[in-house]
Amino acid sequence: TATIVVADSALKVGQTSTVTISFSEAVTGLTADDFVVGNGSLSGLSSSNGGLTWTATLTPTAGVESTANLISLDGSRYTDLAGNTASGTANSGNYAIDTQR
């Protein structure tokens, strides 16, 4: 299972937020392209503990005002160290974006 936490749930112009993805067991093959990001993008995805916890930077899309955004991860997009895929989808909590000037 995966848990996705967005550190800052209200992003404004010029702001970014750390996103932490925690798994119940170590995973491999995870990339930023595996995530669906509402009105934004993830960059710098990395793990410093063998694939159990991952961090990335969320950058909101410019010129957007939206109070309903999620980051989703489909379990079929990554595997555990034994090569097993997960099932289901993990979603972050809601975050708001106001990047309109």
Image (spheres, grey):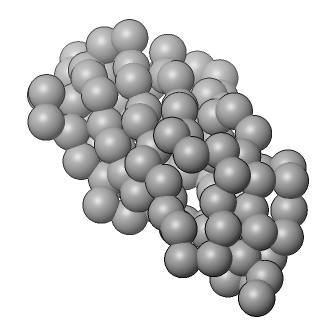
Residue 33 in view in this figure: no
The answer to which of 10 and 84 lies nearer the viewer is 10
Measured from the top left, where is residue 64 in percent x and y?
79, 76
Image quadrant holding the C terminus, namely bottom right
Where's residue 15, x and y in %? 53, 68
Identify the residue at horizontal 26%, vertical 23% (top origin): 52
At 64% across and 60% down in the image, what residue appears? Answer: 11
Q: Residue at 72% x, 46% y: name it.
A: 95
- Rendered position, 59 above or below 63: above
- Report the number of discs: 0
Q: Please say if 50 is above or below 36.
A: above
One can see residue 101 in this view? yes
* Residue extending furthest toward the bottom: 101
Q: Is residue 13 above or below residue 6?
A: below
Q: Classify residue 43 by image quadrant.
A: bottom left
Residue 50: percent from left, percent from top: 13, 28
Q: Left or right of 18: which side holds 73?
A: right
